[in-house]
Image (cartoon, helix red, strand yellow):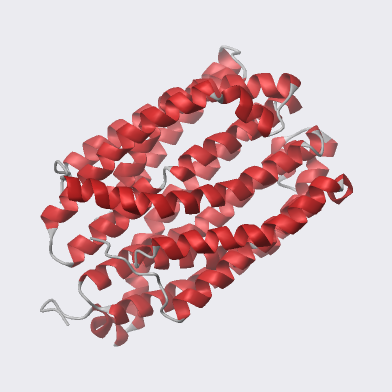
Amino acid sequence: MSAAGSLARRLVGGFDELDRRIVRLALPALGALLVEPLYNLTDSAIVGHLGKAPLGALAVATGALNIVGWTAAFLEMATVSMIAFRRGAGDDAGAARAAGAAYAWSVGVGFVAAALVAVLAVPLVHVLGGHGAVGREAVLYLRISAVGLVFLLVSLAGNGHLTGLGDTATPFRIALVANGVNVALELVLVYGLRTGIAGSAWGTVGAQVVSAALFALASRKAAVRPLRPGRPELARLGRAGVPLTVRTAALGLALLCSTAIAARLGTARLAGHQIALQIWLLLALTLDALAVPAQVYVSEGLGRGDRAAAVLVGRRTLRFGLVLGAAVGVLTIALAWVIPLVFSGDPGVRHQATIALVICGALQPAAAAAFVLDGLVLGASGYRTLQYAMLASLVAFAPLAGWTLADHGLGLVGVWLALTCWLTARALILGWRWTRGHWGLTPAG
């Protein structure tokens, strides 16, 4: 045990203290996570009232952009673990250099991603099933959105820096401001200036610029400010990025395939799938708020050499997650016939969205377990464990997804049951590895 004392020893005497620590970190994280899906829902509502084709185009373009964002998410995920681990070990200088490495990587990767999206917009849209009016508007949205990708990735690095320091309140405030700017710009551009889906894309770019600027300012005022990284810090983040990129690419691939399959089932089903998918992101990613304290406190405990603390945090966050997952699932099913009314005036679209939302609600407990376990294994720097679990879960997704692609009669039921198999397999694999202590541990620092 370290001279600072064992986190586990301090907490075992009173679980209420651990609960308070989890809640203090999770609540602002919950707010930040809620803001982004709520904006996406607002975006879908704004564009959805332009017609089925623009909403379908938004679904296709969002699917492609999500792959970019999730692939670059290692900038946030690995940075949280590295900074929290170093802070737990009392190495503030190492934590500062890890933050600097995150910012350096974000700029480089951001420019490459922007160039690729701009150049490959047409083939990307075609692969995702976007044709005709849907395809043209999706390409336009993607090429405009490419302008904001560098700023998006800088924000990911900033979020990782502050969260690793145990500050989730500042990212929450930044998310509120940036997404408020986003909605205001979209309303002016789409409805005021009548720029259509292009106005929606430019509104998002403007918000990404604001977000990056605010994160850069907050990082300069943080308790541990970024320092120029050396080769070891850059290499460490790069090594972590490989399995995490594979992991998030596999995650995005499942959701991307679900959109691509829905696009081949008809415009009404595609639009209904877009509505349900945004609700899923709102609910499932909301549960990811518990993954934040799971990751930070596991990393801090391991930085102190205190494995018992990690096990204790895991038990408590998993319990919270399963209860919340069941609650939001029941609520989603109860509102499945009401929610689609907000997003579309088309009866066919609303019917398809309701079908998907019922299944979406049923899979929430599995989503909660998968998200919390992700945070726990991330905190232990089990990056390869996460990679293998996500690849294996694609095998569970594939049979029903392929069947639905071959037999369109299965419709969105087939698409969403495939997603249920995917999430359940992911939760079972990660749960098995975590409970047996097989974390695939690598040095976080």
Is residue 222 in view?
no
Q: Position of residue 196 (x, y in %)?
A: 62, 17
In which quadrant of the rendered view does residue 262 lie? Answer: top right
Q: Is residue 54 left or right of residue 245?
A: right
Q: Position of residue 240 (x, y in %)?
A: 34, 54
Residue that appears at 52% across and 54% down: 285
Residue that appears at 29% across and 50% down: 237
Is residue 189 in view?
yes
Residue that appears at 31% across and 66% down: 442
Q: Of all residues shown, which one is farthest toward the bottom?
A: 13
Above or below — where is 39 with respect to 371?
Answer: above
The quarter of the rendered structure image containing the N terminus is bottom left
Q: Is residue 156 left or right of residue 137?
A: left
Q: Position of residue 104 (x, y in %)?
A: 25, 37
In which quadrant of the rendered view does residue 268 lie? Answer: top right
The quarter of the rendered structure image containing the C terminus is bottom left
Residue in the foreground of this view, choosing between 108 and 316: 108
Residue that appears at 50% across and 20% down: 144
Q: Is residue 300 left or right of residue 16?
A: left
Q: Of all residues shown, which one is farthest toward the top?
A: 193
> In the rendered picture of this protein, how many numbered marks are placed on residues?
0
Q: Position of residue 125 (x, y in %)?
A: 64, 28
Residue in the foreground of this view, choosing between 333 and 233: 233
